[in-house]
Amino acid sequence: MSGTVLDVTGTMLRVDRAGWEAGIDAVAGATPGLVPVAKGNGYGFGLTNLAEQTTRMGADTIAVGTVFEIDPVREAFDGDIVVLTPWSEDFPATDPRVIPTVSRLGDLARLAAAGERRRVLVEVQTSMRRHGILPAELNVAAGYLRALDFAGWVIHLPLSGAAADEALGLAGTATNAHPGPLWLSHVTAAEAERIGERTGQPTRLRLGTKLWLGAPTTYGATSVVLDVHRVGKGERVGYRQKKAPGNGHLVVVAGGTAHGIALEAPTPAATWRQRATAVATGVTAASGRALSPFSIGGAKRRFIEPPHMQSSLVFVPAEVRPPQVGDEIGVTVRNTTYLPDEIVFD
């Protein structure tokens, strides 16, 4: 295998363009007032690709997470750009295409006093308790809006609970303080329509995950096999010189922590079964027997040691035929943290 020349040496997100775009169009067609959200790693597809898709579907506005994501999106989209992170005094200079979200009463007062009639969205605090002006302070906030170009109220809801009922109540409070469009997250299109009818105000529905990741069969991650070595039980391998668990092969695969592969986050487990699974997974990892996200021979294989920045070491037992250098193998990733080396549209 030492003479193998690799055409590619990294990780890839392979996308069936026609299928992926059909899924996007289905969601967009069923969502009046859609505002696509392109933030972070671009849900694995990259910010520029999502901006291009926003242009293709004819949306007039896109939302980004932070000010640092404005420029990559601006290159491929010429409409309005909403920034979701709350405005602060180090926000870029006034740009007619960029709409900041103001989430603190003091900041709203400062912007009003500046006399620039800046276009703004104003966020209402919900039960998420993340950002937003308290509902009891919205009448005070409304007093500042006369000095600004008010684009509407933002209501960002939690994923669980009676989100639509909460949204309706907050929308009523906000629009009673000052009429304006309602920019909603985490309600359905039908619920947004009902809120608009009850308040008499236009609604905009911000979508990210459902829009970009709603057709999971149309995309998938792969990694290239970089090296394969035969190992015997008990042989020491890797940075940490762990013992091979048996006879088989050590497979070196492209993709590691730098790509967002095999990174963990707090579990959202809600049921006892889900919690028990999380505990069992943690015990397995602590014992050095953690499953990797890489699939070889029809099953996920175990890490020899924690993944490196750019590659991972996995063990394939002797009874399983090992892959060859240059082969692409499947890898399970979380699209919101995945940073592929290449995005390939088929």
Image: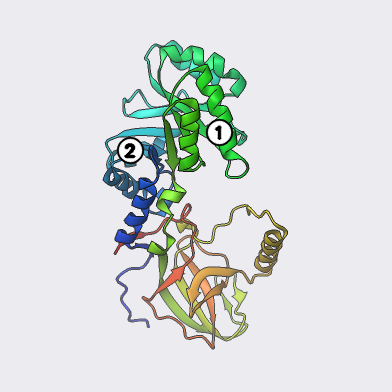
Q: Where residue 7 appears, x then y in whole percent? A: 29, 71
Q: Vertical placement of 272 versus 99: above or below?
A: below
Which quadrant: the C terminus? bottom left
Q: Nearer the viewer, mark 2 or mark 1?
A: 1
Could you say whether the residue bearing mark 2 is in a helix, strand or loop? helix
Q: Which mark is residue 167?
A: 1
Q: Where residue 72 appears, x then y in whole percent? A: 33, 42
Q: Which residue is mark 2?
A: 71
Could you say whether the residue bearing mark 1 is in a helix, strand or loop? helix
Q: Where residue 155 appears, x then y in whole percent? A: 52, 32
Q: Where residue 34 appears, x then y in whole percent? A: 39, 40
- Which residue is nearer to you in this view: 159 or 203? 203
Quarter of the figure with residue 97: top left
Q: Vertical placement of 43 versus 134: above or below?
A: below
* Disc nearer the start of the sequence (2/1): 2
Q: Residue at x 59, y 73 (%)?
A: 241
Quarter of the figure with residue 134: top right
Mark 2 to mark 1 CA distance (whole Å): 32 Å
- Which residue is nearer to you in this view: 279 or 61? 61
User: Which three-letter amino acid code belongs to the residue tagged 1?
Assistant: Ala
Q: Which mark is residue 66?
A: none
User: Which three-letter amino acid code belongs to the residue tagged 2?
Assistant: Asp
